[in-house]
Image: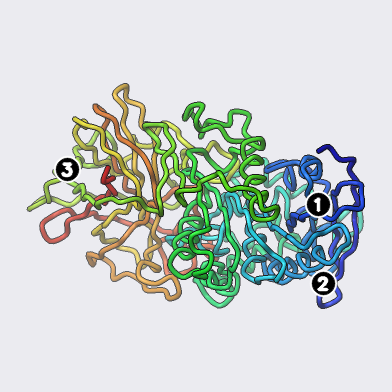
Amino acid sequence: MAHNIIVERDVMVAMRDGVKLAVDIYRPDDDVSYPVLVNQHPYDNDMFLVVHELLFSPLIAAQKGYVVVSSEARGRSGSEGEWRPYGDEGRDSYDMVEWAAAQSWSNGNIGIYGACALGLAAIQGAVENPPHLKAAFSYMTATNFHSGWTYSSGGALELGFQMSWVWTILARDTLSRLGLDPASLAEADKKLVEASSDLIKSASYLPLIDFPAYQNGAAPYWREWLSHPSYDEFWKNVDNVAQVEDIKVPVMHLSSWYDTCMKGHMDFDAALRTRGDKSVRDQHRMIIGPTDHSAYYNKRPTYAGERDFGPEALTGPDVLAAMLFEWFDHWLKGEEKTFLAANQVRYYQMGENIWKEASSWPPEHTIVPYYLHSAGQANSRMGDGSLGRQAPKTEPLDSFIYDPMDPVPTTGGRSMIDVPTGVLNQAQVEERHDVLVYTSACMAEPLALSGPVSVTLYASSDAPDTDFTAKLVDVEPGGYCANIAEGIIRARYRNDREREEFLEPGQVTEFTIDLWDIAHTFKPNHKIRLEISSSNFPRFDRNLNSRITPALGSAEDARKAVQQIYHSDQHASRLNLPVSAS
């Protein structure tokens, strides 16, 4: 049924403490009450693409018989108060849901939704458990503001993402609220423009915490985030995974294999199914596609980087909107559920380029080790590194020098920065002497993976702290080296994200590098390859190889480190692959 639409802009809605948030409302122009979809974001409601059309147009939602309530977070754009990133979004979302439920145009059935930053606020709202909330929908977002958003699961700062997010969107609104005179405001804005024009140069600045464009009030949260590298109370208060028991409504959440936020979705899904409210455990749904974080606005929506995953991988606003409306039509309107009725997880098996379903994630699999081997010269893809099923016996170690002033460049992968992401050819990176490369023989049969990938690494360093990185690569018959998954571990956090533990220089230490989950099939005549190094810049910040927190260190604090990788009967370094039961 077609509706005429009313749009109400900048409606000021009071929260429980009296602070008023600016809200845009899209609703059918009649006296009927409708279900309501609520979002909250740190942007501006006039940023129509970012706020709305990444998932669906609110005008279309109103045509379908919904009211859309879009609120600017406190301290942002037209809203009152002070913005504490993700410190108030949960409570304010609760208040907004309950306010919407009390309006004459509402029938009391409220859904909460969002993509990226909006999705994080949506999950925070669900954790607060407002009485009228019936369902939630989240797309490509974090569920723990620390791990998988500001920092990696291995402890390194998600530098490129955080730096570009601040200068692209966040800092300008912050500056506009400082009461600067026109000349000072123009100068501050000029610094942001200059910073954004060269990501590598900006990310190379030391100390990172004193990045010039973010000083003098432009981005106070930047200093705050970088001052809390450990998982401490600052972050625990905004950890939705830790509070998952408080979610009482069904959640549909979507991500992709090359999404920066994918790890958060996996952790969230596992928590919902093991610790979530039992009354809705079997109602949650998770979908994982093959694309990257930009898929919903990518002009080539079946691509991730250079790889086209085929027509089955199609995404974008039309596809996402269909899923979202089907989800909310069921939970808010009582319509029949047809999507993922039998299984709770839908995922894209890369390599085969097909969708599969499972009752839970991960599907049944066996962890199969592929051991590192070499004659001590595994440096670069021209070296003698190999991967095999047989455990090593007595073999010489491999070594390389990690220089934080000459880091390994980010080349595709699960990033959200102003450089190409997704699948890129790794051949050039693998020519570096500070990248160890281990390659299997050609696959005689398909090898299907579905589940968590990790590396058990026995290594030593002559530095008190350093990083180790790992990258899983599919080497194709024509020589193209396609990155499949990557990970990093900051040595000081190897045992505990809450407590630093420095290395004994030269002592062999076991590290576990989490490459996150994957669903990928290595085809016949393809090879499995593992890269080992110590940097992935500018996706992650550089470890300066000292006891100082990397974000606080200067160029004078940086030093080279000698890294040694062991593969022997006593120290069997290995790649752990989740081989599918099917």
The residue carrying pointer 1 sits among few (fewer than 14), some (14 to 19) or many (20 or more) residues within 10 Å by Cα, namely many
Q: Secondary structure at mark 1?
A: strand
Give whichever of discs 2 and 3 has the lower sequence position.
Answer: 2
- Residue 522, percent from left and from top: 30, 34
Q: Nearer the viewer, residue 375 or 305?
A: 305
The residues bearing labels 3 and 1 have C-alpha atoms spaced at a distance of: 58 Å
**Numbered badge on residue 15:** 2
Q: Please report contact status of discs 3 and 1: CB closer than 8 Å, yes or no.
A: no
- Residue 441, percent from left and from top: 19, 33
**Numbered badge on residue 388:** 3
Residue 48 can be seen, yes or no? yes
Give whichever of discs 1 and 2 has the lower sequence position.
Answer: 2
Q: The residue under label 3 is which amino acid type?
A: Gly
The residues bearing labels 2 and 3 have C-alpha atoms spaced at a distance of: 60 Å
Q: Nearer the viewer, mark 3 or mark 1?
A: 1
Asked whether, in this view, residue 18 is left or right of residue 244, the answer is: right
The residue carrying pointer 2 sits among few (fewer than 14), some (14 to 19) or many (20 or more) residues within 10 Å by Cα, namely some
